[in-house]
Image (spheres, rainbow, N blue to C red):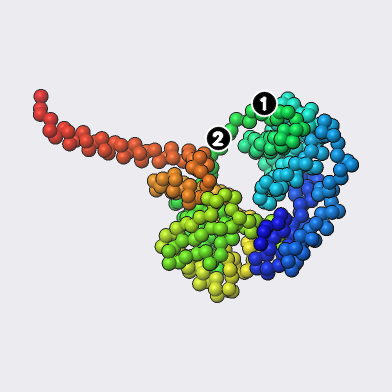
Amino acid sequence: MPKIKNIYQDKKTKKWFFRAYLGIDENGRKVQKTKRGYASQKDAKIAYDKYMETHDFNKTIPNQLCSTNQMTFEEFYKDRFVKWYERQVKSQTYENAQFIFEKRMQFFYHFRVRDITSHDIEDWLFELSQTESRNSRKKVNGETLSKSYINRIRGHLKIVLDRAVKEGVIAKNPVEDVSSLPSENKKVEFWEHSEFQKVMNELKDDKIQTHHRKIVYEMLFYTGIRIGELEALPWSNVDFEKNTITIEKTLIYNTKDDWYFSTPKTKCAYRTIGLGKKLSLKLRQWYDLQKRIGNFEYVAQLDGTFTPPYSFANWLKEAAKKAGVKPIKLHALRHSHVAFLIEQNIQPLSIQERLGHANIQITLGTYGHLYAKSDQQVVSAIDNVQEGAILSKNDNLLPV
């Protein structure tokens, strides 16, 4: 059955639903509407089309289109770019980009596309650099948008104006004359293995809830998979004989009633990962324990529903504080896995395959600085070889 944009099937109930993107609210947050319970994909599509007819975002009114020379950035974006871009990328990528397109680029909305200059873009980038960071979970006074995020926004503007060039609206993309901001060389955060064990010791196995959290954290640390990949992992993709798991999808969790499965971003993200005997045994113990509660399809389920990723993040933070270890983000357990592998002298290509990176440049670009720590091991190995060679040669030297 071919996939239809914005139409999804609930794997549990087998019913169909649609997710409509309606723009952003006054606080800059995405506004989406999800409606469930349709018997077929066709019914969901009909309902979606009917729903979107009442919203300007999905309308095309030919009489209101300006000529190419007079077209504003907002008109080009909404009337031309959106329809093209939606067909080019995955639905999740499209939805994630909407905030940047509709919030961060409002600076240009009233510009005619042909009037946008490199100086305008430089002014816009400066304005972004003075913009306070939007973070709903923690407020840090004076914290502004990071350079890496601003460069990401710049990249999205380039995509829009590249399309304008393609359609003959402008002759050249002015973004090409504006350099990216210099990178901040921000190092990834991670835990040493000893720190992770110290935090795990705070999670006693006397309650099923803590057992549940512990197996989730251990799976993330020792496999390097993402939380979305773990939550979307069915027991059918766990091979206890070979001690492996197979990653085929990821969970996109918005709310308790608004979640769906998405396919990995690249072919390399489809992968089979070895667990080892000890982790496989722990996972088997969790399987047996979970069966006492109910017959659940997915590894990380406790009551038949999906636990919000931010809940796992908060519990991890609490455990770290109790253990006297500096808290890290939940995703940093993936970074910790890489640091652990590097510590064990695992080759970069093996790490790339395990993480599901599309190429080795992504792996080295993100984690290359961690190899500096292992350089001492290289130096020691070189010294040991040379020391042995010198001693064996000196044995044959005659005294002067």
Q: Secondary structure at mark 1?
A: helix
Residue drawn at (53%, 67%), measured in percent from left and top? 236
Label of residue 272 in the image: none
Name the residue located 65 percent from the left edge and 66 percent from the top edge.
Answer: 11
- Position in image of residue 8 (x %, y %): 69, 60
Q: Residue at x 46, y 61 (%)?
A: 244
Q: Is residue 142 visible?
A: no
Name the one closer to the observer, 132 or 74.
74
Q: Which residue is mark 2?
A: 185
Whether residue 176 is situated above or below residue 290 in the rendered picture: above
Looking at the picture, does residue 196 appear above or below residue 156? below
Residue 176 sits in quarter: top right
**Residue 397 or residue 214, whichever sits in front:** 397
| Residues packed near mark 2 inside 10 Å, few (<14), some (14 to 19) or many (20 plus) | few
Closer to the camera, 283 or 95?
A: 95
Residue 19, image x, y percentages:
74, 57
Instruction: Please say whether residue 186 is visible from this viewpoint.
Output: yes
| Residue kind at label 1, given as amino acid type | Asp
Residue count near mark 1 (Cα–Cα under 10 Å), binned few <14, some 14–19, many ≥20: few
Determine which residue is flagged by label 1. Answer: 177
